[in-house]
Image (spheres, rainbow, N blue to C red):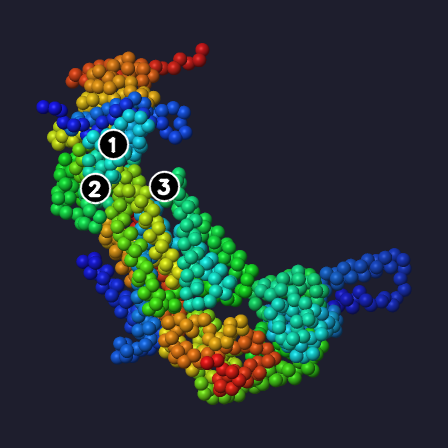
Amino acid sequence: MSPPAPILRLRDVRYRYPGASQDALADVSLTVGPGEFHAVLGPNGSGKTTLVRLALGALSPAAGRAEIAERPAHLWPRQELARVVGVVPQREDNLFPQRVRETVLLGRYPHLSLWGRERPEDHAAVERALTACDVAQLADRWVWTLSGGEYQRVRVARALAQEPRLLVLDEPGVSLDLRHEMALFELVRGLVDRTGVGVLMITHQLNLAARYADTVLLLSDGRPAAAGVPGDVLTRETVERVFAWPVTMQSLDGRPQMVPLRQPKEPPA
Amino acid sequence: MALAHFARRRSPISISPGMGIFIMRRWLLAWLLLAACRPSGRPAGGLTVTDAAGRTVSLAAPARRVVSLLPSFTELLFAMGAGDRLVGRTAWCDYPPAAHAVPSVGDGMPPNVEAVAARHPDLVVLYHSGPNVTAAEQLARLGIPAVLLDLNRLEDLGPAARTLGRLTGREVAAESLAAAMDSLAARPPRPAPPPFTSIVFVVWDNPPIVIGRGSYLHQLAALAGARNVFADVTVPSAQVSLETIAARDPDWIAVLQDSAPPGAPAFATRREWRAVRAVRERRFLLLPGSLFGRPGPRSAEAVRELRARIEGVGGASR
Amino acid sequence: MRWALLGSVAVLALLASVMLGPAAVPWGELAHSDIVWNLRAPRAVLAFLVGGSLGVAGAGLQALVRNPLADPFLLGLSGGAGLGAVVALALHLSGPWALPLAAFAGALAALGLVYRMGLVGGAALDPRILLLGGVAVGAFTAAITTAIVSLADAAELRNAFLWLWGGLSAASWDSVLLLALYAPVPLAVLMAAARPLDLLALGEEPARYLGADVEAVKRRVYLAASLLTAAAVAVSGVIGFVGLVIPHIARLAWGHHHRALLPAAFIGGGALLAIADTLARTVVAPRELPVGVVTALIGVPVFALLLRRWTIA
């Protein structure tokens, strides 16, 4: 039995922003299939955001291919793409007050016709998404009353309401405290295991990525420093080279965990 | 005044040199004090009037170089025989024809103080309004006497004529002019002729602005035997609803119009104005601005003209 | 329930507009009165259409620029319209439609200018620049207008400012027909953009990922809202506060769900302007207040109340 077709496939993509002196991304390949959790790691400026844009068709690669469900990403019509890929971007600026249920319902937009009303199956999808993200009890709350962690789960619920085959999360744990960040990673892992959705996550959290993700891509200056299972990618030499800081590696549940070492500055003599 | 007397009185007693210096110093002091407290522009024996703005204006002698900043004043000055004294007028002053020979100092709204001063007048006559008060003060600072006169209704004509007559030394001619204009303005009061028709003066069409009883046009209409349907509006002009005009159903619509071709005003073709009977029946009175646009010595002629047009004699517009 | 209430308010407003007025029309004669049918009825309908257009345009614009203080007249359209009108008067253009057409042309010119300014990087509209550009164009056109008025034949042009202050005096079945034929297209464009506007409230990037064609939506909403406003100004001058306040009032009951908010803003705006016009015609009868004054007198206290609610919430 052949493995199921990947939802997202990047093959040797290269991209340079107009007017830039060097490539933002080069020779990058990555595959995310159903039921796979793929993390992308790297220092600031290593090209993670560019990768997401290429994957979603917002940018067109100068070389190589970016495909979603075997079709070039930038050729997907927007609404159709939103039925396959659900994105939780880093920033969201909801100026106007809304209730949780309403904001999750926005995720059904890709499935609605121009003039048609929301149908029972849309409301059912919202309910499922709310339950899956453990925010059903918050459904009638105003969004501005939620904590950071709760709001983040609501955003994931909205992406889930799109009933996508792929979830893309851009640094979802930023500004969340320990409990909420852990809860978020547990949520994502649970979704992957239970529903078979594929996940592409950009994150700074090496250790959490190592424990939760199936595969990892480590970027450095727009190039792949290492790719594969966490155990193969997150070695001391690789991490020290990419992040330019001494670390020591430990193991937890068979997954590598990185501990940065101290490097105090000598006072001038 | 006492100090002035003191300063000018010659001392009758003989003075020793020391005392002479003492007295001279006192004269000097007195003269300085006198110069400081003598009000400017008040030569003994000159013409003095208090104008509509409460300002006191004094001339040493009747004005010989007058700038008039209102067409009505220009007309009044010519009518009382002081037209030859005019050295400046506004661009709007078009009557009598001799006025065209007088140099223009601009449109007067607001007055161009420099242009006025360049005519070297010894008297400037202005219509009493806020901006003109400022202009008058600027002229006064230049040493040019400026007088502000009210001219809103027919009853203002007599007093204006008399004031101008005094200031130009043409009191006699001004008095007979004023008497005629007072009579027109019903002073002393007497009952107006009973109206035999109704009228509305439309100043602007969108939004509709009409003349109320505060305006001299209302007075002209009453004298011509036309009842202003907006006599209940106290101010000179006001915005009203078109439906009020339609409901009050005036017999005539009067419009001040100079440049448009004879026929009907522009708004007559608009659909909503056709709700007014006078518009449907094209009962328009297109009144020339020169005669009707302001109260003046020809106001009696304006009343006659208005009456004639209403009665169908002399070219009422159809 | 809310719709029933709004509908009743609208119907009552229209009825009041037709039944009340400075001219005393006996009730028995209402149905036959020339004044009612040729003056009040078209004026009531025009007030409703203009108020509704301004309400919807305001709601759309507030969503587009993501700023609850946006008002259709922040886009520089009123300045352009005023300049067009003043130029028409200065050139003594004649004809009953000269003034509205010139005002409309002026508004379109301002629209084009602001649109051009708002285009950054070729095709993308930046709403913040639209706002700033609108204010700049508005100030610029106002300055030119004032210059023309001060240099030219003063009396007639001063009266042009009275027209610009807003009034439905020129209402007739002709102008109603024109607006009724013109307005549905931009209204339909705005309604079609209702859901994408909901998404746009999250931000342009999230909206894009949810499937909205963000650039097309911005373009269409801006143009449709501006065209509605331009027509409103051409027909009835600048009537402020309707486009600013009505969307907020509607949001109190319908939230930010634009598929309901936009129609509610239309009906609410129409009702408000009809009521304001009735008041303008009746409170100082036989004189008439400029309707823009009445909407401001009503709108400012309401707006102040809403602001309090905002800062407390």
- What is the x, y in percent for residue A77? 25, 39
Q: Residues within 10 Å of mark 3 (few under 14, many from 20)?
A: some
Distance, label 2 to label 3, CA atoms, is 22 Å
Chain where mark 3 sits: C
Q: Indicate the chain on which mark 2 is placed.
A: A
**Badges 3 and 1: C-beta atoms under 8 Å apart?**
no
Which of the image's four quarters has the N terminus of chain B?
bottom right
Assign a secondary structure to mark 3.
Answer: strand
Residue at image coords 18%, 49%: A117
Q: Is residue B60 depicted above or below B22 in this figure?
A: below
Q: Position of residue C25 (x, y in %)?
A: 31, 78
Determine the chain carrying the residue at label 1.
A
Identify the mark at residue C124; answer none if there is no mark. Answer: 3
Label whose residue precedes the other's in the sequence (2 or 1): 1
| Residue located 24% across and 17% down the image | A233
Q: Position of residue B166 (x, y in %)?
A: 68, 76
Of residues C64 and C97, the one nearer the viewer is C97
Residue tagged by mark 1? A72
Q: CA distance from mark 2 to mark 1?
A: 19 Å
Give the residue number, with chain letter if any, for mark 2.
A110
Q: The residue tagged with tag 2: helix, strand or loop?
A: helix
Residue A89 % position (x, y): 27, 34
Q: Amino acid at mark 2?
A: Pro
- Residue B176's place in the image compared with C232, above or below, is below
Q: Secondary structure at mark 1?
A: strand
Establish whether labels 3 and 1 are both on one chain.
Answer: no
| Residue A16 visible in this rendered orientation of the protein | yes
The quarter holding residue B182 reads bottom right
Q: CA distance from mark 3 to mark 1?
A: 23 Å
- Taking C269 as reference, is A194 above or below it? above
Q: Residue at x 14, y 44 (%)?
A: A123
